[in-house]
Amino acid sequence: MNKKLPSFAISFVSRKATSKKLNKHIIYARISVNNSRTEISTKRYVSPHVWDSKAEKMKGDSEEAEDLNMFLQGFRQRLFEIHTTLFSLNKPISADIIKQEYCNVHTEGTKCIIELFEKHNQQVEEKLDIDFAYGTLERYRVTLKHIKSFVEHKYNRDSFGIHELDYEFVVELEHYLKVTKGIGNNSTLKYIKNFKKIVLIALKHGWINKDPFVLFKRRLIPVERYALTKDELSILEAKSIAIARLHLVRNLFVFSCYTGLAFADAMKLTEGNIIDGVDGAKWLKVDRTKTKVISYIPLLPKAIEILELYKGWDADSNKLLPFFSNTKMNAYLKEIAAVCGINKHLHYHLARHTFATTITLANGVSIESVSAMLGHTDIKTTQVYSKVVQQKISDEIGKIKGSL
């Protein structure tokens, strides 16, 4: 006698979601086997006014509706396959068993890319000042924020299975960042590069078999670096600034113009960073926050002058210089640019550019020495500044060609 197939039905129902999505309903798959019933969250969201409860699908023929309805069709099919497999193996069948089988089969396959990204960021946070700088953590946090908003925008969900990642996801993410969010090409590619690291983790663990980035080829657009000219730097140094906070920020900025230190490295300096160099003069020995490369930088007279100015500025602090947050520093530098009549976007990292070009390369310091002082891991990074100097030389020679 053939075993009788138990009654089996799947329906989709929507229910009001959490407070974060008051305008959305979450869709559940309701499994019914004989007299047993249970539900599985599809982790997909839909606006109640476009959900057809009778047809159990989203209304309309938009791309969003087509995507959601195809997903639900596939979801239904997977549950039917589990039911059929259980029956063919003569195993017990109930709504709860089918749900458990679904969860067991898809635990690794549907590992959420967002959850993996969150775990990654937590590990980065735990390794702050060991393997990572705070700025790195912030970049990963911002990238994760963009991934979350993209998944919600494109797929109407708050999660996305790793097994679902494909080339189309990457291309659509690029389009979303550039078009919907209005983010520039280079910043978009940097966010995608951060996301790619998480995908590579999934590949190494064997959670996915194919790299969705294999066919994704994009290039950064070269950005023109600029720095303060010798005249602009002289104006900045000589300007009498009565407002205390602006006076201090100007001095800190000038200090980095003569040392090439990035904001994070300048703000963490202590007496332990000052050493006697091979020439008997005072040098800085700095373990760069970003690259973990040790830089040796001779202290120029102007830098020493500023250090002396703030010597013992706070008896309770071992830091050589007073400090602000990077955000405040850059905000104040905009004010300083206006006060000094400098028609350039003044930000703290511009001091590093100025050191590389106006202070060193333009005065004959070799590119190898500049690269070492800046703590670059690749001299190609420093060569960007040499192009700026070449352009400066070309412009200046151009001025005298007509008189020769």
Image (cartoon, rainbow, N blue to C red):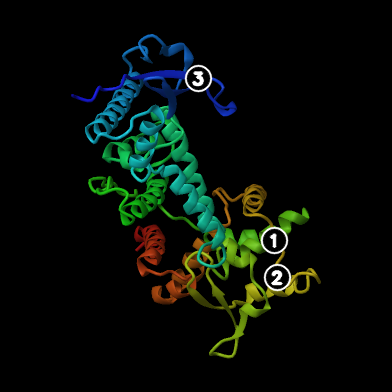
* 109 in relation to 44, above or below: below
Numbered disc 3: secondary structure: strand
Q: Which dot, 1 or 3, sits closer to the camera?
A: 3
| Most distant residue in the left direction | 1
For this orientation, the residue located farthest to the front is 1
| Residue 44 visible here | no
- Local packing at callout 3 (Cα closer than 10 Å; few below 14, some 14-19, many 20+) is few
- Tag 2's secondary structure? loop
Q: CA distance from mark 1 to mark 2?
A: 9 Å
Q: Nearer the observer, disc 3 or disc 2?
A: 3
Q: Which residue is mark 3?
A: 15
From this view, report whether residue 316 is shown above or below residue 328: below
Q: Quadrant of residue 317?
A: bottom right
Q: Amino acid at mark 1?
A: Phe
| Residues under numbered marks 1 and 2 in contact, where contact means CB atoms less than 8 Å apart | yes
User: In the rendered view of the protein, which quadrant contains the N terminus?
Assistant: top left
**Type of amino acid under label 3:** Arg
Which residue is more in the foreground, 391 or 301?
301
Sequence-first disc among 3 and 2: 3
Residue 252 spot, x, y in % from top left: 66, 63
Label 2 belongs to which residue? 319
Quadrant housing the C terminus: bottom left
Q: Residue at x 55, y 57 (%)?
A: 125
Q: CA distance from mark 1 to mark 3?
A: 51 Å
Relative horizontal placement of residue 283, taking residue 378 as reference (left or right): right
Q: Which mark is residue 323?
A: 1
Q: Is residue 101 above or below residue 250?
A: above
Q: Secondary structure at mark 1?
A: loop
